[in-house]
Image (cartoon, helix red, strand yellow):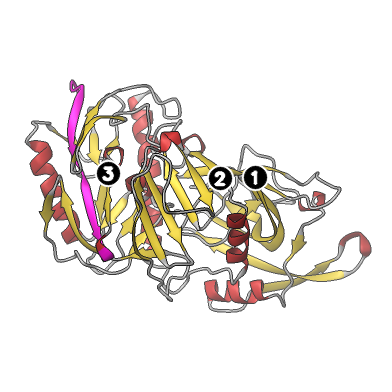
Amino acid sequence: MVKRCLKREHKKAAAAARTRTRSTTVLELKHHSLTAIPDHPAAQETYLRRLLAADEARANSLQLRNKAAFTQSGKKATAAAAAAAAGAEVPLTSGIRFQTLNYVTTIALGGGGSSRAGAGNLTVIVDTGSDLTWVQCKPCSVCYAQRDPLFDPSGSASYAAVPCNASACEASLKAATGVPGSCATVGGGGGGGKSERCYYSLAYGDGSFSRGVLATDTVALGGASVDGFVFGCGLSNRGLRRPGSAASSPTASPPGTSGDAAGSLSLGGDTSSYRNATPVSYTRMIADPAQPPFYFMNVTGASVGGAAVAAAGLGAANVLLDSGTVITRLAPSVYRAVRAEFARQFGAERYPAAPPFSLLDACYNLTGHDEVKVPLLTLRLEAGADMTVDAAGMLFMARKDGSQVCLAMASLSFEDQTPIIGNYQQKNKRVVYDTVGSRLGFADEDCSYA
């Protein structure tokens, strides 16, 4: 059982709710300097546009992965189950300092014996849309700059390359490429022997990639230690959206543009109630054999500020819940309906329009306003569950002075594409991934107390 909570940002516009109803929230606007984002307006715009362009590339790539999804056989599930049994609580922080709008955490990789030279802390992204954890390793032929030292397999007594005849190599890489895993016979080191190694190759929609050896080692996170964890030891990597090292996980937490945004990731434990949370409402978790790493749900309806919206795309099955995508993508008909109702209610407060920003086309000039009344989007889910977007997830601060604040959602290109609920809209939510019960749960929670 996996749960996560996302902390609301406290150093940006739309950071603190003054009063709240189920459908609207009045927010006090605080235009503080964001230390992780350039102060100069032109530099800030370039910085945020680059991050949103990378997010757009990722969202587009997810539409093409139906036939190329990566699964990791039973190894990943085994590792997650072991960590869950230990009841791990993993702190999460914003990745904005690593030039990503995703959440990051720290893991300790390596050890397992008297030698701890290879073990060390590594910063990784938590991403529900990927299924292989990977880090940059020595010796690295092509590596990008990262803050953490590269992982050194030779210093870890518990490190082992996955052999070609292992099920992790055969099943995982065949699922990703349609062919069995790539293998090579290499020298055995000081012993003079030879061994076979299983190689992996992953590419992302933003142009980043990782290629290297599939391996196992001990990983520690949140006080829990997992032996035999399968991961990618990257020897040739390009990192556009990843921090120093990169990883995926069956859980995730999204950030915003504030450097102190945070949250928590819980593995295992009782899901009936959570500290500072409303009761969890559950909907069915849908498994799509064509896209095995992903978590889907059915959205049956929607409302904005309490007003129901009608659109041909509502009621679509297989809506993707993804922590690695930042901005939610809706079917064109749904986005138009949501945008129109949001503009009707938000415009009634006489907030002047501002130019579009990157993929965000509904923007407003909030200069001079100390607080704003924000209509909230509620998604109606199968089995009667609801998910109401927190006010911090409704508006994207394109300019620090509040002169360009945008509806933090975008439209897909076509009606038949897969809608994505991104991490920006999952703020201040306790999201439960109950893989045993095949259900997804949502609860409102002030994650600053997580």
Give whichever of discs 2 and 3 has the lower sequence position.
2
Task: Tell me the quarter of the picture where residue 329 sits.
Answer: bottom left
Camera-near label (2 vs 3) is 2
Q: Is residue 13 above or below residue 202?
A: above
Q: Is residue 185 above or below residue 40?
A: below
Instruction: Tell me the number on the disc at residue 408.
Output: 3
Part of the protein shown in magenta: 366-383
Mark 2 residue element: strand
Looking at numbered disc 2 in the image, what kind of residue is underneath it?
A: Glu
Kindly identify which residue carries mark 2. Answer: 89
Kindly identify which residue carries mark 1. Answer: 223
Q: Is residue 450 above or below residue 280?
A: above
Answer yes or no: is residue 377 visible.
yes
Mark 3 residue element: loop
> Badges 3 and 1: C-beta atoms under 8 Å apart?
no
Answer yes or no: is residue 251 visible.
no
Classed neighbour count for the residue bearing mark 1: other residues with Cα under 10 Å, few (<14), some (14–19), many (≥20): few
Q: Foreground residue, 339 or 87?
A: 87
Give whichever of discs 1 and 2 has the lower sequence position.
2
> Badges 2 and 3: C-beta atoms under 8 Å apart?
no
Indicate yes or no whether the magenta region holds residue 382: yes
Q: Viewed as shown, does residue 436 lie left or right of 228?
A: left
Classed neighbour count for the residue bearing mark 2: other residues with Cα under 10 Å, few (<14), some (14–19), many (≥20): many
> What residue lies at 13% left-to-right and 47% top-to-bottom?
306
- Give the Cα separation between the discs numbered 1 and 2: 7 Å
> What residue lies at 19% left-to-right and 37% top-to-bottom?
374
> What residue lies at 47% left-to-right and 43% top-to-bottom?
103
- Residue 231 placed where, x, y %? 64, 59
Looking at numbered disc 3 in the image, what kind of residue is underneath it?
A: Ala
- Residue 432 placed where, x, y %? 42, 55
Q: Viewed as shown, does residue 221 lie left or right of 431?
A: right
Q: Foreground residue, 349 or 365?
A: 349
